[in-house]
Amino acid sequence: MNGTMEIPRSRGFWLVAIIALVWNLIGVAMFWMQVNMGAEGLARMTEPQRQVYEATPAWLNVAFAVAVFGGVLGALGLLMKKRWAVTMFFVSLLALLVQMIGAYLVTPAWDAYGPAGLVMPVVLILIALLFWRYAQKCVVRGWLV
């Protein structure tokens, strides 16, 4: 026995950790589908969507990978009660920002999607921000070691 008492976590803690894991695993699936898209997938896209896809440089896909796998590691860190979850969620958030801003700067995303196309990136960034802030609060509460 190490003489320290473990601080109990609420059911909400476990619920948020599981939701974060599922959410980021969905992101991994989206990443996998994007980087392994074949001719059939490209054929189903509209012309503007195909132009965005074809104009996407490899470094944006790297940022996408870092964002989703960083988020998975952050969620696993929460489930394992480790404070490095905060770092992983922060890395995920930064990579997501690079990916989203980069997509609008170096591809014809604005022409393809217009202002309405910003809704999903903003939602994704807000969710990533919330996971990071939640992990920070978990450290303050003593739930992560």
Image (tube, rainbow, N blue to C red):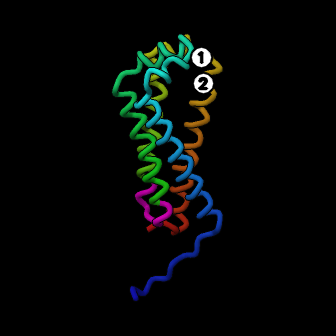
> What is the CA distance from the residue labelled 2 to the residue labelled 1?
8 Å
| Vertical side of 103 occupied by 19: above or below | below
Which residue is at 41% across, 51% downward?
A: 87
Which label lies toward us, 2 or 1? 1
Picture quarter with the C terminus: bottom left
Tell me the tag on residue 118.
2
Along the line of sight, which residue is nearer the eye, 39 or 46?
A: 39
- Amino acid of disc 1: Tyr
Residue closer to the observer: 59 or 39: 39
Asked whether the residues under the numbered discs 2 and 1 touch, taking CB atoms below 8 Å apart as contact, a structural biologist would say yes
Q: Residue at 51%, 56% (x, y): give it.
A: 136
Could you classify mark 1 by the number of other residues whose Cα lies within 10 Å: few (under 14), some (14-19), or many (20 or more)?
A: some
Magenta-drawn segment: 78-86
Q: Residue at x 61, y 35 (%)?
A: 123
Q: Secondary structure at mark 2?
A: helix
Query: Which circle's residue, 2 or 1, is located before the other in the chain?
Result: 1
Of residue 106 and residue 36, the one placed in the foreground of this image is: 36
Residue 15 or residue 33, whichever sits in front: 33
Q: Secondary structure at mark 1?
A: helix
Q: Position of residue 82 (x, y in %)?
A: 43, 64
Q: Quadrant of the N terminus?
A: bottom left
Write the residue at 60% across / 57% down: 16
Q: Is residue 85 magenta?
A: yes
Q: Which residue is mark 1?
A: 113
Residue 115 lies in quadrant:
top right
Tell me if mark 2 has few (under 14), some (14-19) or many (20+) residues whose alpha carbon lies within 10 angstroms of its own: some
Question: Is 126 one of the magenta-colored residues?
Answer: no
x and y percent of residue 77 in the render? 45, 59
* Residue 20, position as x, y percentages in the image: 55, 52
Percent across and percent down for residue 144 are 48, 66
